[in-house]
């Protein structure tokens, strides 16, 4: 069977949906583009040849992706794709900082000293300076919130 006529799999569909989200396309526009290029309305019905044409169109619209180097596959046979704006060493996003504040508020922690103390215990700094550090703080706060809610449920 010709690889270009074989139907795409779940990883390829995920890549197409990733491109759709990165380009900020709503569902109707996304389906119109697919239909214009392939004559089909759904990505799950595409062949590899049609997917190549669709990805070329997304590339002209500004979508870029870079496959990981073979040394980064960690034993996986298929490459995984990374978003260029998800650099773990970049500054924390506004969404991450808002989520941290929302979690503090949900726990009832309004004192600045308590917030700084928790963050310092998590990352040895008084505020997260990278996305990776923000993730550590968020996950720690989520774990505390989960334990707090779990203990409330057991008491009721």
Image (cartoon, rainbow, N blue to C red):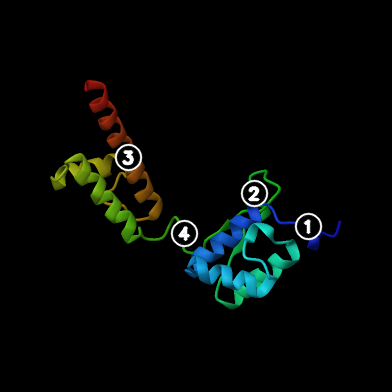
Q: Earlier in the sequence, mark 3 or mark 2?
A: 2
Identify whether 139 is placed above or below 16: above
The 10 Å Cα crowd at callout 1, few under 14, some 14 to 19, many 20 or more, is few
Residue 18 % position (x, y): 54, 60
Residue that label 1 marks? 6
The numbered disc on residue 73 is 2
Between the residue at mark 4 and the residue at mark 3, the CA separation in whole angstroms equals 22 Å
Horizontal relation, residue 70 to residue 89: left or right = right
Identify whether 35 is placed above or below 88: below
Horizontal relation, residue 12 to residue 86: left or right = right
The numbered disc on residue 126 is none
Between the residue at mark 1 and the residue at mark 2, the CA separation in whole angstroms equals 25 Å
Residue occupying the far right of the picture: 1
Residue that label 3 marks? 142
Between the residue at mark 4 and the residue at mark 1, the CA separation in whole angstroms equals 34 Å
Residue 55 % position (x, y): 64, 69
Mark 4 lies on a secondary structure that is loop
Q: Are marks 4 and 1 in contact (CB under 8 Å)?
A: no
Of marks 1 and 2, the one in the foreground: 1
Between the residue at mark 4 and the residue at mark 2, the CA separation in whole angstroms equals 17 Å
Q: Earlier in the sequence, mark 1 or mark 3?
A: 1
Residue that label 4 marks? 87
The 10 Å Cα crowd at callout 3, few under 14, some 14 to 19, many 20 or more, is some
């Amino acid at each position: 069977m010709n690889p270009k006529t074989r139907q795409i799999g779940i990883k390829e569909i995920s890549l197409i949906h990733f491109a759709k989200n990165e380009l900020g396309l709503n569902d109707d526009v996304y389906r119109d583009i697919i239909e214009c290029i392939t004559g089909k309305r759904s990505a799950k019905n595409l062949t590899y040849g049609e997917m190549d044409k669709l990805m070329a169109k997304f590339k002209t619209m500004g979508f870029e992706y870079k496959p990981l180097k073979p040394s980064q596959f960690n034993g996986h046979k298929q490459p995984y794709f990374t978003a260029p704006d998800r650099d773990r060493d970049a500054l924390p996003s506004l969404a991450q900082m808002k989520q941290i504040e929302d979690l503090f508020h949900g726990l009832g922690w309004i004192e600045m000293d308590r917030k700084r103390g928790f963050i310092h215990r998590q990352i040895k700094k008084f505020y997260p300076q990278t996305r990776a550090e923000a993730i550590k703080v968020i996950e720690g706060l989520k774990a505390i919130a989960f334990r707090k809610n779990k203990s409330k449920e057991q008491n009721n």
